[in-house]
Image (cartoon, rainbow, N blue to C red):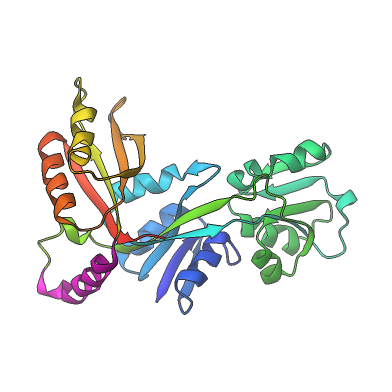
Amino acid sequence: MKIAIQGELGSFSHEATEAMLPRAKIVPCPRSLDVFNLVARGSVDGAIIPIENSLAGSVAEHFDFLFARQVYVVREFRLRIVHNLIAPPGTKLSHVRRVYSHPVALEQCRDLFVKNKRLQPVPFYDTAGSVKRIISENLQDAAAIASRRAADVYAGKILKAGIEDDKKNFTRFFLIHRGDSLQVSNRAKATRKRERKTQTKTLKKAGKTSLAFSVKNVPGALFKALSVFALRDISLSKIESRPVRGRPWEYVFFVDLLCGDTEASRNALRHLSEVAEKVKVLGIYEPA
């Protein structure tokens, strides 16, 4: 399989991909937009994207793409995030003045900068990409925050290991494919037989559902929408709102249900479609 990731080889997305799909050929992309475009065109078999970090919260851009694009979630995975301070060979910690990394990684290592006032955090597009840059340019006054795998890939030197502020630092990843979730895609043609078989197998193991919905801006609209789950004793593990592009002050709600394709969930979704403006099932999948 060809799997797209946002970031370079050695990134945490790379680590997650190897854990989920050990035989996959990884296609690195500089931007999330590129990842979703490759999936939409069928240039790759799927993608693995970070969707939420236990410390930094959700990856808002990826929620927007999941709602707007014809993709569906197949599986989720949780990766323990261990950050390391990595520099070119021969560099000493006392020489370092700049530290490059993704803004989320920098935010997760605030204590490093509090204890070392001389270090200046420099936002970069990717954790592994920051290692790639400082090594390729041999920046002797710079370091990067990234995974141990990134140090191995680019032959960097780990100056300090495990520098994240909180050791209970996990990122949740989604494996996504092109198309619609089987739950809402009953229009599939014969050409999609094989895809439907794969989805059916996934549904048998499924214990989690992700969906998005919007409601009218009237009193009680959100209460009515959420009550369809409460009435059927369906537990929600997450709810989050995102603004709708082109419609100021209107929002889409993203919800995770702790159930798969059950009679109760199907009835809840039918009920939800009666009280919500738009409902999209993002995926029914095997939970981490």
Locate residue 205 relative to residue 36 in the image: left or right.
left
Outermost residue toward the bottom in this view: 23
In the image, residue 148 above or below residue 51: below
Q: Is residue 53 visible?
A: yes
Q: Nearer the viewer, residue 206 or 240?
A: 206
Q: Quarter of the image holding residue 72? A: bottom left
Locate residue 220 relative to residue 145 in the image: left or right.
left
Residue occupying image coordinates x 15% and y 74%: 191
Percent x, y of residue 78: 48, 58
Q: Is residue 120 visible?
A: no
Could you tell me which quadrant the N terminus lies in? bottom left
Give the residues in magenta. 189-206
Q: Nearer the viewer, residue 161 or 140?
A: 161
Total labels: the figure holds 0
Q: Quarter of the image holding residue 120? A: top right
Residue occupying image coordinates x 36% and y 58%: 37
Percent x, y of residue 276: 16, 35
Percent x, y of residue 26: 49, 71
Magenta segment includes 267: no
Outermost residue toward the top in this view: 219
Q: Nearer the viewer, residue 149 or 206?
A: 206
Locate residue 92 relative to residue 101 in the image: left or right.
right
Residue occupying image coordinates x 25% and y 45%: 234
Magenta segment includes 199: yes
Could you tell me which quadrant the C terminus lies in? bottom left
Q: Quarter of the image holding residue 225? A: top left
